[in-house]
Amino acid sequence: MTQNLTYRGPKIALFEPEIPQNTAAIIRTCSCLGAKLEIIEPCGFLLSDKRFKRVVMDYMNKKEIKFYQSSKDFFESKKNQRIILMTTKASSSYTKFKFEKDDTILFGRESAGVPEKIHKIVNYRLKIPMKNNKRSLNIASSVAIILAESLKQTKLI
């Protein structure tokens, strides 16, 4: 799939998403807020999955989603572009980060995040601060928080 090359705005990238309902909710969020979505395959489900269809409803537009066959393909296409990894392992908070219009904001698998080799590739790693003893937010909630902040900072909303 190809994307509109004139698009200037944040891109949300999902690394090997596993849960159809989460991905569907993220598609709806991106659609409603005008962000592009990129999916690094393999997915842990089929787009025909009834759980996916129930949540995505009529917000699914494959022209608005770019699929990458692998993380290698994804990173090759992103040379000289900023990729921000959202991870619970980061030390820097998203609240202290300056987002730019063309950022790609990468989110890992629901069960395991991204492999260590990807942590080493990216230059920016951020977290959403949480109260003590809490592991993580749902990925769809995390995407909504970070996308809203990015759009606010870059004055795209």
Image (tube, rainbow, N blue to C red):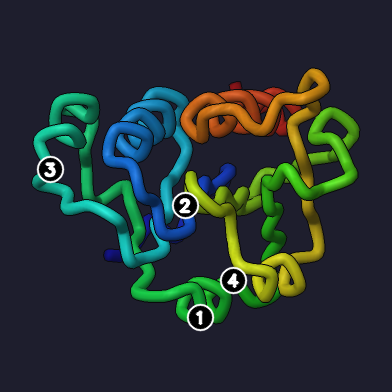
Among numbered discs 1 and 2, the one appearing first in the sequence: 2
For the point 41% across and 63% down, the residue is 40
Dot 3 amino acid type: Asp
Residues under labels 2 and 3: Cα distance? 18 Å
Above or below for 124 versus 56: below
Q: Which residue is mark 3?
A: 49
Quick check: 148 left or right of 19?
right
Residues under labels 1 and 2: Cα distance? 14 Å
**Whole-percent x and y of residue 39?**
39, 57
- Give me the disc on residue 14: 2
Quadrant location of the C terminus in the rendered image: top right
Among numbered discs 1 and 3, the one appearing first in the sequence: 3
For the point 67% across and 32% down, the residue is 135
Tell us which disc is closer to us: 1 or 4: 1
Among numbered discs 2 and 3, the one appearing first in the sequence: 2
User: Foreground residue, 7 or 127?
Assistant: 127
Q: Secondary structure at mark 1?
A: helix
**Whole-percent x and y of residue 29?**
41, 27
Among numbered discs 4 and 2, the one appearing first in the sequence: 2
Q: Secondary structure at mark 2?
A: strand
For the point 46% across and 26% down, the residue is 33
**Whole-percent x and y of residue 96?**
90, 33
Q: Which residue is mark 1?
A: 72
Q: Which residue is mark 4?
A: 78
